[in-house]
Image (tube, helix red, strand yellow):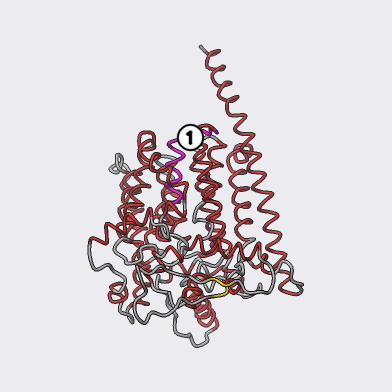
């Protein structure tokens, strides 16, 4: 039993530790500036204060609610509580998105190992981890909780077939409920969850009625609790008016947005996750060999696009089309189902796409995603439309420009840059000149360890630096160990197949 556990779980455990370490080592040490995370952190701290006051019989302070309700905040509480003892709640909570992303990567690897050879599984897993927008979101957060539970629900429903064990069924139900409820917009995924339930119970629901009823009750209970909590935030705000300001005013724009979500040079999924270009050819092939998985991935993508395409900025703030964060791992799975073995001759294009993706994702992880917005505001060019579609302000090229300044132009002198735009024929009367900025004001990396590498350190700063440096060493060692184990398993696999064939021949 112990030998079987070691064979199955050691490599995924090492992968989780390795990716966690490599994600965490580049953390900024703070998360409050990432989207609405400060809002959720305030809500979590107030939850702790309310609980403490109630337990001690003190006056209970009023609750502070967040836009997605209390459900996602519950996952923050252990980090916030620990942060009151270690450095700060903000510091400890910054670990969470990296750990969740590492968990998602581990589930992806476990699922790929059921579809692919060891080397192909590891290649696709590491590409997903460091060659897609999953890497930058290990610091941005926002989407990581929902994406983790969407993939976990899919894995529990599809990877191992049907199950009658209550613990696994309840975990599946909870994962489905959380996938629907961790974000206010999660309800758009109900067709995906319905399909997973169908895949698990479709041809045997009469014999498993008690299991099916329990799953539906758990999902419904979680969603109702989330809906109640979300209403606590929005009842004092005009939710319809808030959304209406961001909705397109012509349905022709819907078609344009659908195409742009995939191919826009500033927000396209294929730009920020180049490996998914292979999905165009992989999906039909994967459908022939693994129909349930392919439908899950395509349905998830379609549901997300159906909603986000009604927005004037379907990519939203972040690095790439952040609402499609949950689709990355399932689409990678389709590539694994289409090409389960690795061959340099056949997979050379995949390797090239992986390398390009690593370069792009590194730029997203190295700099805070809001740096470009600060620069746009300084030049009076921070309109939503320019943020989403202006090639001069393309996030990838802008971060590359900052990285070049940081890496190749050391010194105290300014590095001036003017975001010039080309007027059609001639400037309009009264137009103002384009504003010039100093790129050196924006090229500071977000990583705590990188920023303070050459600075003298002591006290709490030294301890934080040691944590991140240790994470780097741990991550590199663990990922290296995973690579060695996967190569060893790849070499042993043909031997095991040969031994099985030989035993069958002797039996005959």
| Frontmost residue, 404 versus 92 | 404
Could you say which quadrant of the image residue 428 lies in? bottom left
In magenta stretch: residue 338 = yes
**Pointer 1 residue:** 340
Tell me the crowding category of disc 1: few under 14, some 14 to 19, or many 20 or more residues within 10 angstroms, Cα based: many
**Point 36% across, 82% down: residue:** 430
How far across and how far down the image is residue 239, in percent?
31, 75
**Point 42% across, 77% down: residue:** 65
Left or right side of 139 for 484 = right
In magenta stretch: residue 339 = yes
How far across and how far down the image is residue 339, in percent?
46, 35
**Point 50% across, 75% down: residue:** 374
Mark 1 lies on a secondary structure that is: loop
> Is 39 located above or below residue 281 in the figure?
below
Q: Quadrant of the N terminus?
A: top right
How far across and how far down the image is residue 472, in percent?
68, 57
Q: Count up the numbered dots.
A: 1
Range of magenta residues: 328-344
Can you see residue 81?
A: no
**Extreme residue toward the left, this view:** 251
Can you see residue 98?
A: yes
| Frontmost residue, 366 versus 302 | 366
**Extreme residue toward the front, this view:** 425
Main secondary-structure element of the magenta-colored stretch: helix
How far across and how far down the image is residue 393, in percent?
46, 66
**Point 61% across, 38% down: residue:** 486
Left or right side of 14 for 75 = left
| Frontmost residue, 86 versus 475 | 475
> Is 504 located above or below residue 27 in the figure?
above
Could you say which quadrant of the image residue 285 lies in? top left
């Amino acid at each position: 039993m112990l030998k079987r556990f070691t064979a199955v779980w050691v490599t995924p455990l090492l992968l989780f530790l390795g990716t966690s370490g490599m994600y965490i080592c580049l953390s900024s040490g703070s998360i409050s500036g990432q989207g609405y995370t400060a809002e959720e952190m305030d809500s979590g701290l107030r939850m702790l204060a309310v609980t403490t006051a109630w337990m001690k019989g003190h006056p209970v302070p009023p609750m502070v609610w967040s836009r997605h309700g209390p459900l996602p905040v519950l996952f923050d509480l252990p980090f916030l509580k620990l942060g009151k003892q270690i450095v700060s709640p903000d510091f400890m909570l910054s670990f969470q998105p990296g750990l969740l992303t590492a968990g998602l990567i581990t589930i992806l690897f476990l699922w790929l190992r059921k579809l692919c050879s060891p080397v192909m599984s590891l290649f696709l897993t590491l590409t997903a981890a460091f060659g897609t927008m999953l890497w930058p979101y290990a610091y941005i957060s926002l989407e990581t909780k929902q994406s983790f539970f969407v993939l976990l629900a899919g894995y529990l429903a599809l990877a191992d077939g049907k199950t009658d064990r209550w613990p696994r069924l309840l975990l599946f139900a909870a994962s489905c409920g959380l996938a629907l409820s961790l974000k206010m917009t999660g309800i758009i995924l109900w067709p995906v969850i319905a399909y997973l339930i169908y895949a698990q119970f479709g041809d045997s629901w009469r014999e498993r009625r008690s299991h099916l009823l329990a799953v539906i009750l758990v999902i419904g209970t979680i969603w109702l609790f989330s809906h109640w909590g979300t209403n606590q935030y929005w009842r004092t705000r005009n939710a319809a008016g808030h959304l209406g300001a961001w909705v397109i005013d012509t349905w022709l724009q819907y078609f344009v947005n659908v195409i742009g979500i995939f191919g826009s040079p500033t927000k396209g999924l294929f730009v920020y996750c180049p490996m998914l270009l292979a999905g165009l050819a992989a999906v039909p092939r994967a459908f022939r060999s693994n129909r349930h998985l392919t439908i899950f991935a395509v349905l998830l993508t379609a549901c997300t696009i159906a909603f986000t395409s009604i927005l004037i900025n379907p990519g939203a703030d972040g690095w790439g089309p952040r609402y499609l964060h949950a689709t990355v791992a399932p689409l990678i799975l389709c590539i694994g189902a289409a090409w389960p073995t690795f061959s340099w001759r056949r997979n050379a294009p995949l390797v090239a796409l992986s390398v390009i993706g690593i370069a792009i994702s590194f730029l997203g992880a190295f700099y805070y995603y809001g740096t470009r917005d600060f620069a746009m505001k300084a030049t009076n060019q921070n309109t939503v439309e320019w943020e989403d579609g202006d090639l001069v302000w393309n996030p990838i090229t802008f971060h590359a420009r900052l990285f070049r300044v940081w890496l190749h132009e050391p010194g105290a002198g300014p590095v001036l840059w003017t975001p010039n735009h080309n007027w059609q024929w001639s400037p309009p009367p009264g137009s103002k000149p384009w504003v010039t900025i100093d790129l050196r004001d924006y090229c500071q990396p977000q990583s705590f360890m990188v920023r303070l590498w050459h600075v003298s350190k002591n006290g709490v700063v030294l301890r934080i630096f040691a944590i991140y440096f240790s994470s780097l060493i741990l991550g590199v060692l663990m990922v290296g160990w995973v690579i060695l184990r996967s190569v060893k398993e790849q070499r042993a696999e043909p031997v095991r197949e040969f031994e099985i064939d030989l035993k069958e021949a002797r039996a005959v």
